[in-house]
């Protein structure tokens, strides 16, 4: 007989299946700083001004895992399940759920009376449409994980959604929040010929949602939202409006916060952190989750599968090993992160304790070894500043070792500048390209016209959520933030499938260890830093949910 699990038993079941048994198995969220104001009764009214780094180009978070899009748009949407302020699962569009068949069937009952921002009813058809037409095709983490698990979605009635898997699938509930699975409206998007692009789907720039705020206007410099008076959570939100102001430079963002031009920053740059914490007019809090999810690793991508006609600089393992040996990751971490987080010591984030492998033989910083490896691979030092290809696999003879590096504005670009300086010492020239989200995604994932790039690959709370997409051969696609390296190893594909079908975390541990040992041997990526951000906001504002990126200001209020 199938064992039935109701919402009352959900949290224990989920944590046992995905995190090794209890809450402490997850990365503990750092304590809120002393400058955080005391809890006070919320005040209704006012507008919260938030700084964002760039024009997102789209406001549809269901068709991408791009952090810039999610930061800008998630306050307009909901997931079936959310993260509460305590870091635990909480109902959102789904009031309750039942798990049957050892994790092969999940039945969700939707909250009654939910309306889209245009007044139409939210139903189970919207959930089915969102998954089948958007998330399972275009959202890199959801497509790689839930999609690879072979899910079937049915809608017995307007308030019921059933997810059915051919094999037990443990981490589904962790993938249903507004970051991993924002629900979009079928009636607005079903006429789009290509949901992924604004050109084919203008609704991407003017979406309606079910969330606490609805869109008023969108320009390349500012996004304005107003309170959803018909929000299904009684009394929320308290704020009348939310403004997202594009400020590309992170230092300028801090100055804007100090000058009361903005009220909230998603992340404080390392050089400004001490000053911000010392300011009594400001408050800070740890950010266990970012716009791209949780347990994130800043990762350098080696393009192992460039398009025809483009030199395959990183086809030879020895070249990838040489770049690792030439890179002082500890120095980069100190210069850029100011010791926030830690240098990555495995391909899977340490916050996923049951899957994280310790004691792996990652390459160490060794400039002499880097030069030897380059010589062996055919990159010759001919007395010039840049090495020349002489018999290099996938690269025409006479080609200079001059590569590009793609990254977003901010810390990702700074990593590029550090790499440019460090790799110059071994005869590799690096051109750093600072790009906005759409440009980066198109160059790296759609066209694959890049040599190296950097992404914050968020692993989530289970490797199925954010790790599979990086290594699975099936995820070499045009989907943003999928398998950017173009890495393919049949043994790794088999291990990923084995781990996904195994509900017992103790049995999954050795599978993921073997996977990471192979990844360290093959080095399709360079894992730099386990991120740990700090948010900052004006001290007169309270009620932020630092666990849930999408609904961070759902219950916020500011005394003016």
Image (cartoon, rainbow, N blue to C red):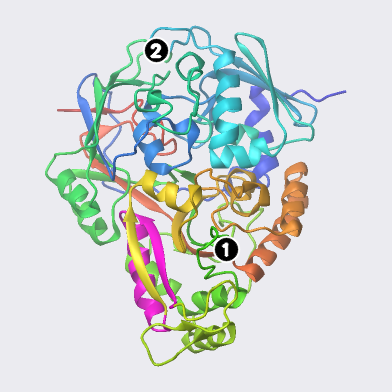
Label 2: few (<14), some (14–19) or many (≥20) C-alpha neighbours in 10 Å: few
Read off the magenta span. Answer: 400-427
Instruction: Report x, y in % for residue 70.
Output: 41, 36
Q: Secondary structure at mark 2?
A: loop
- N-terminal of the pair, mark 2 or mark 1, is 2
Q: Is residue 193 left or right of residue 409?
A: right
Question: What residue is pinned by disc 2?
Answer: 234
Please report the residue visible at 56 percent of the width from the left and 32 percent of the height from the top. 135
Q: Report the mark closest to the observer, 2 or 1.
A: 1
Q: In the figure, residue 455 lies in which quadrant? A: bottom left
Please report the residue visible at 58 percent of the width from the left and 82 percent of the height from the top. 391
Question: What residue is pinned by disc 1?
Answer: 304
Q: Find the distance from the CA under tag 2 to the CA under tag 1.
A: 51 Å
Report if residue 406 lies within the magenta region. Answer: yes
**Above-or-below relation of 7 to 516:** above
Instruction: Report x, y in % for residue 316.
Output: 60, 73
Total labels drawn: 2
């Amino acid at each position: 007989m199938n064992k039935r699990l109701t919402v009352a038993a959900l949290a224990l079941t989920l944590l046992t299946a995905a995190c090794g048994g209890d809450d402490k198995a997850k990365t503990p969220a750092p304590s809120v700083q002393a400058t955080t104001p005391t809890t006070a009764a919320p005040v209704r009214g006012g507008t919260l001004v938030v700084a964002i780094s760039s024009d997102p180009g789209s406001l549809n978070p269901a068709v991408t895992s791009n952090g810039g899009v999610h930061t800008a748009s998630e306050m307009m949407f909901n997931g079936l399940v959310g993260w509460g302020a305590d870091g635990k699962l909480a109902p959102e569009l789904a009031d309750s759920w039942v798990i049957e068949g050892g994790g092969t069937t999940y039945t969700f009952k939707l909250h009654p009376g939910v309306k889209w921002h245009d007044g139409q009813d939210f139903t189970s058809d919207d959930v089915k449409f969102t998954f089948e037409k958007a998330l399972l095709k275009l959202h890199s983490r959801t497509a790689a994980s839930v999609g690879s698990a072979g899910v079937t979605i049915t809608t017995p009635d307007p308030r019921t959604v059933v997810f059915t898997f051919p094999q037990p699938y443990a981490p589904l509930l962790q993938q249903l929040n507004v970051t991993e699975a924002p629900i979009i409206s079928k009636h607005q998007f079903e006429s789009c010929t290509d949901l992924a692009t604004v050109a084919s789907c203008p609704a991407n720039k003017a979406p309606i949602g079910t969330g606490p705020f609805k869109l008023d206007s969108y320009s390349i410099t500012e996004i304005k939202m107003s309170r959803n008076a018909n929000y299904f959570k009684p009394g929320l939100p308290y704020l009348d409006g939310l403004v997202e102001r594009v400020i590309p430079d992170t230092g300028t963002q801090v100055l804007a916060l100090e000058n009361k031009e903005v009220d909230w920053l998603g992340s404080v740059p390392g050089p400004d952190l001490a000053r911000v914490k010392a300011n009594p007019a400001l408050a800070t809090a740890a950010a266990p989750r970012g716009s791209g999810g949780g347990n994130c690793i800043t990762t350098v991508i080696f393009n192992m599968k460039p398009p025809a006609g483009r030199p395959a600089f990183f086809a030879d393992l020895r070249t990838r090993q040489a770049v690792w040996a030439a890179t002082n990751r500890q120095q980069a971490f100190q210069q850029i992160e100011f010791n926030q987080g830690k240098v990555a010591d495995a391909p899977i984030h340490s916050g996923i304790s049951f899957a994280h492998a310790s004691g792996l033989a990652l390459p160490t910083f060794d400039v002499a070894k880097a030069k030897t490896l380059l010589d062996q691979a055919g990159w010759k030092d001919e007395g010039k500043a840049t090495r020349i290809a002489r018999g290099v696999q996938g690269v025409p003879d006479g080609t200079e070792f001059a590569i590009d590096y793609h990254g977003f504005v901010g810390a990702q670009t700074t990593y590029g500048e550090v790499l440019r300086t460090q790799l110059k010492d071994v005869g590799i020239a690096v051109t750093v390209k600072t790009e906005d989200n759409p440009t980066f995604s198109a160059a790296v994932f759609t066209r694959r016209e890049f040599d190296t790039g950097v992404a914050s690959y968020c692993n989530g709370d289970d490797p199925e959520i954010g790790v599979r997409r990086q290594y699975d051969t099936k995820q070499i696609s045009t989907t943003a933030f999928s398998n950017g390296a173009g890495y393919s190893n049949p043994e790794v594909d088999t291990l990923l499938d084995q781990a996904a079908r195994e509900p017992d975390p103790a049995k999954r541990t050795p599978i993921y260890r073997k996977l990471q040992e192979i990844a360290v041997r093959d080095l399709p990526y360079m894992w730099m830093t386990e991120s740990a951000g700090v948010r900052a906001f004006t001290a007169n504002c309270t009620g932020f949910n630092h666990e849930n990126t999408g609904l961070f200001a759902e219950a916020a209020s500011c005394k003016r």
